[in-house]
Amino acid sequence: MSIQSAGESPTGAAPASGAPDGAPGADPRTAPDPASPQGGHRTAAIIPAAGRGVRLGPGAPKALRTLSGTPMLVHAVRAMDRARAVSLIVVVAPPDGADEVRHLLDEHTSLAPGGELPATDVLVVPGGETRQDSVRLGLAALPGDVDAVLVHDAARPLVPVDTVDAVAAAVREGAPAVVPALPVPDTVKEVEPRPGGGPEPVTGTPERSRLRAVQTPQGFALKVLAAAHEQVAREGDGATDDAGMVERLGIEVVVVPGHEEAFKVTRPLDLVLAEAVIARRRATDGF
Ligand code: C5P
């Protein structure tokens, strides 16, 4: 893995897996993909990791908290690195924490599970006030040869590679926007929020069979996501995910199957679940 600062070009800047660019043995992820309909255009993953993680309780920014001794962000970077389609990872660090994140990723470079060396180039840029700002800053750092992008929350460190690959493949096959999602087990109520804490009147019950809980990575044709972020910046409106912004442009978003292990680490109980998933993976597949 080659860790770079904003401003350094990740394109061809660092050989993958120590092999010279284009030389025999170079990692296929950094070489042009002849099967790509765009003729060699690249897929990048943006990992927004600038959130403070207040709901997890006091402590370091959420992405830097450890799971089984390894920062959540490193798990997330490894998950993207394992995907064949991804040839560049842009990590969006806390606004004042880009150097710390760069050092952290350097430290963990040779510690990939199973001993394999991460081969994807990694660029670290400082994030913004909101998740949207952070994704926008990540988009601004992409080199010109990227035409498809996955946006993956650092807070979903255990997403399986098959889920990442399925999203990337659907984008490569022509879908402008793709989200992994799961059916919702609970019945969901819409309410009239009462910020004071009093009982909230129910205003509706959406039909559960039509609901999906969406996860990340969400995948996009780059120009679609860039246009969505441009419009949201102009309108100053908030959306809780990137696909929601694309929907507002009137562009179709499609769903592919998500995975229960792609859950978001938000509350303290999620840390317990994440540790259990890692322990199970260690026992069954040497994760
Ligand atoms: O807060 P939430 O859990 O929705 O955050 C989702 C992701 O967005 C996390 O990975 C978090 O680090 C990131 N984020 C960010 N910049 C912010 C706020 C959140 O990159 N200002």
Image (cartoon, rainbow, N blue to C red):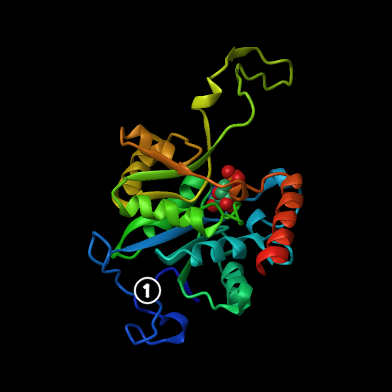
Give the x, y percent position of residue 2: 48, 77
Q: Is disc 1 surrounded by few (<14), some (14 to 19) or many (20+) residues within 10 Å?
A: many
Q: Vertical placement of 25 versus 159: above or below?
A: below
Instruction: Quarter of the image for the C terminus: give it.
Output: bottom right
Q: Is residue 137 visible?
A: no
Q: Is residue 123 left or right of residue 234?
A: right
User: Which of the two residues, 49 or 70, is positioned nearer the viewer here?
Assistant: 70
Mark 1, secondary structure of its residue: loop
Label 1 residue near ligand 1, CB within 8 Å: no
Q: Residue at x 56, y 56 (%)?
A: 160
Give the x, y percent position of residue 176: 31, 45
Q: Is residue 55 left or right of residue 255?
A: right
Q: Which residue is mark 1?
A: 30
Q: Vertical placement of 30 versus 95: above or below?
A: below
Q: Residue at x 54, y 62 (%)?
A: 79
Residue farthest to the front, as pictured: 284
Give the x, y percent position of residue 15: 41, 82
Q: Residue at x 66, y 55 (%)?
A: 61
Q: Residue at x 63, y 57 (%)?
A: 63
Q: Vertical placement of 5 versus 235: above or below?
A: below
What amino acid is labelled 1 in the image? Thr
Question: Residue 84, located in which quarter of the rendered image?
Answer: bottom left
Question: Residue 208, located in which quarter of the rendered image?
Answer: top right
User: Which of the two residues, 44 or 134, is positioned nearer the viewer here?
Assistant: 44
